[in-house]
Image (spheres, helix red, strand yellow):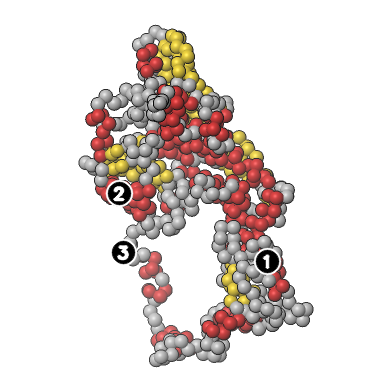
Amino acid sequence: MADTIQLLPDHIANQIAAGEVIQRPASAVKELLENAVDAGATEIRLIINDAGKALIQVIDNGKGMNETDARMCFERHATSKIAKIEDLFQIRTMGFRGEALASIAAVAQVELKTKRAEDELGTYIEVENSTVIKQEPAALGNGTSIAMKNLFFNVPARRNFLKSNAAEMRHIIDEFIRVSMSFPEIQFTLTSNGQQVFYLEKGTLKQRIVQLLGTNYNSKLVSVQEHTDYLNIYGFVGKPETAKKTRGDQYFFVNNRFIRSGYLHHAVMQAFQDLIPSDGFPLYVLFIDLDPAQVDINVHPTKQEIKFEDEKIVYAFVQAAVKHALAQFSVAPSLEFDLDPTIQQLDAVNKPFTENEQSAATNSSLFQSFTQRFQAHVVNPGKSNMPGFEKKEERFESLMDQLRKPVADESSVTIGQFDHASFQPKASTPIAHLQLHQRYIIASTASGFILIHQGLAHERVLYEKFAAANQQSRLPSQRSLFPVSIDLAPADVALMTELTEPLQELGYLIEPFGNNSFVIQGTPADLEQGNEKHIIEQLLEQYKHFANELKVSKREQIMRHLSRQHAIRAGKSLSQKEMQQLVDDLFNCSQPGTTASGQPTFIEYNGSYLEKMFGQ
């Protein structure tokens, strides 16, 4: 009987191991960039074709490798950074596990060119399916060039699971930003399909942040510097006005390695408490340097999740450092105990209160109404002495007149199964809708009324209009007389390119304008113009940070966002005609009761409930 358990062939074992390390093109980009940094390079070039599916090439001017090392680097667990177990707890380099190149060689066709400065000739190697198929000396420049072609060519199932080119390119840019931000003293370039996306000169950390995240942050960064015996913290946080409603640009680095940590993020949020809204997210780029023995970085294949020996101490230091920086640069609020000298110049302070003025004040009806015992609430029924009070009385009487108008006598209504016929009045009894606080609409029903949230109701109406365009044809566009341009950070250009076509189907005409700029030539017809730049910028933020959380399609996310952004805002006064149109449009929707995200658009108050409230 044959044995059941057998050893896997090397090429299959390597492909399985590659599944942990090389999940998508961006994973290979990260590993190759980190190796170039570890090689001591001062210039690193990243070349991408077809979002990394056809080519990922990293060229550096580092120390290079000799012939033996060039051959050995493709073996599993081959590394120059660990010789004994103690080295594992003193790691300061980026790549160290010796699996990156072996994993890449298992799922791609790889070409390696490398040469040390002291060697006359370099080494050229071709590897395919974990097998070296060619090796020869070659005349090369100093440094290393690694090109991986046709990713997952031998694992077609893995290749089929890759996202669109635009989506994969966004992941590549994310990894490029994280590595290049860690090392501002190194020059980085990124070229995609022959077009240069990033050119980052050597400079300071602040210059690198502005290069990567946008020039609008140039004057809105606050320096963080704290040095202690246990750890050092340095970097920048954005001023409170840069906080966004979505998770913005937030980066933590421990010993120059990018990490994710909800725990440390909470420390920063606590430092910003009372400075930004509770739903705001500040910008921060913070570096933490501490003894590698205090950190375990080998707890996750991507090395983006780490363990601190004492998390509470790190949390406290991060929170204190950010708080101190905000206070030091006069960003945090402070108590002012000195009296404003301009107050001393006011008439109420520097002029005497004469007897005539005292007599006139004490005889006024306003003074008497607030000084009579137990009568602080009394207001004389005659003409008020308060300026503008007559207008308030007139508005109140107008409101009462509207409330007294008759309503149709129809059957009661239940939420979610609303009978729009109850809103159709008889010819002799017109119905007036009331606007409350410029936020809600009160609409009469047969036995009560409904309270409609005007913004959420309009959001539902717009969403169904966009959804109808999804099933039929493109929404018509209205050309702008004065097209608006948007300047984007290089990282957002790929995302904008990805969203251009679905936006065009919904009525937005957006065209590239070169040099990371786009022009909004048109907006959906019948929608108010003038806010399109803000809407598109918010769309990019929403899509960039929530695309992986919402289990809905790209188009669905865009429709939800656009309907929310174009909806009527609180504080907008509506005429009777506008309120009637909104109510009609809402109850002509297929699902008038909620928005696409599940928020209620109206609440019903029926007659029996109202009677109970008054004890009837």
What residue lies at 37% left-to-right and 24% top-to-bottom? 76
Quarter-of-image position of residue 210: top left
Amino acid type indicated by mark 3: Phe
Per the image, the residue denoted by label 3 is 337
Image quarter where the N terminus lies is: top left
Q: Nearer the viewer, mark 2 or mark 1?
A: 1
Q: Which mark is residue 448?
A: none
Distance, label 1 to label 3, CA atoms, is 57 Å
Element carrying mark 3: loop
Element carrying mark 1: helix
The residue most toward the right is 427
**Crowd around label 2: few <14 · some 14–19 · many ≥20 (10 Å):** some
Q: Nearer the viewer, mark 1 or mark 3?
A: 1
Horizontal side of residue 371 vs 54, given as left or right: left
What residue lies at 39% left-to-right and 65% top-to-bottom? 342
Residue 206 versus residue 282 in the image, above or below: above
Distance, label 3 to label 2, CA atoms, is 32 Å
- Give x and y (percent) for residue 361: 44, 86
Q: Taking the image as drawn, is residue 106 in sight?
A: yes
Element carrying mark 2: helix
Horizontal side of residue 84 vs 237, given as left or right: left
Q: Taking the image as drawn, is residue 180 in sight?
A: no
What residue lies at 64% left-to-right and 80% top-to-bottom? 447
Per the image, the residue denoted by label 1 is 587
Mark nearer the N terminus (2 vs 1):
2
